[in-house]
Amino acid sequence: MRISAVTLATTCMSTAVDFYKRLGFELHRGGESATFTTFSVGKHHLNLRLLESASAPPSTTLVIFGVNDVDKMHRLLLERGLHPEFEPRDAEWGERYFHIRDPDGHPLSFAEPLAP
C-alpha cells in the first residue's frame, strides 16, 4: 500500500495553482479555472479541490515533501517571491526542514534527512 495523492481544499483555484507552480510543482491536469486540479509530485500527486463556499476551515494537516537539498529549496522559494515561515533548521528527529503555508493556510513542510 502507498499514498497516491493528497487533496487540499481551496477557495480560489487560480491563486492556489499559481502558488504551487511557483513551488515548482508540475501541473498534471486542471488549472486556474478548474474545480479540481492535479499536480505531479514525483510518482505521486497533490490535488486541489475548489470549495463551494468562500471560507475554508483552517487546516491542521501537515503535508511533508522530501527534497534533496532543503537549503537550496528554501532559497529557490525566496527567489520566487514566496515566504517560508522560518529558515531551515535541524530537528531532533533527524531532519533539516522548513515550513510554508499555501494561500488557503495549509501548512507544508520541506525536509531532508540529516547525515548520520
Image: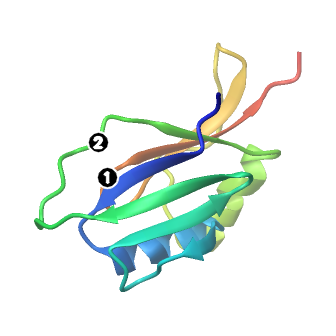
Where is residue 61 drawn, in percent x and y? 38, 35
Q: Quadrant of the C terminus?
A: top right
Q: Furthest-right residue in view?
A: 116
Q: In the figure, is residue 97 to the left or right of 70?
A: left
Helix, strand or loop status at disc 1: loop
Residue pictured at 82% horizontal, 45% vertical? 68
Where is residue 30 drawn, in percent x and y? 48, 78
Query: From what the image shows, is residue 17 above or below residue 77?
Result: below
Q: In the figure, is residue 76 to the left or right of 19?
A: right
Q: In the figure, is residue 92 to the left or right of 31?
A: right
Q: In the figure, is residue 45 to the left or right of 12?
A: right
Name the disc covering residue 59, or none. Answer: 2
* Residue 67, quarter of the rendered image: top right
Where is residue 39 drawn, in percent x and y? 58, 65
| Badge 2 density bin: few <14, some 14–19, many ≥20, Cα 10 Å | few
Is residue 109 or residue 13 the one in the foreground?
A: 13
Helix, strand or loop status at disc 2: loop
Q: Are marks 1 and 2 in contact (CB under 8 Å)?
A: yes
Q: Furthest-bottom residue in view?
A: 33
Name the disc covering residue 27, or none. Answer: none
Residue pictured at 64% horizontal, 13% vertical? 92
Q: Quadrant of the N terminus?
A: top right
Where is residue 83 drawn, in percent x and y? 48, 60
The residues tagged by marks 1 and 2 sit, at their Cα atoms, a distance apart of 7 Å
| Among numbered discs 1 and 2, the one appearing first in the sequence | 2
Q: Is residue 53 at least partly visible in the picture?
A: yes
The amino acid beneath tag 2 is Ser
The amino acid beneath tag 1 is Gly
Q: Which residue is mark 1?
A: 105
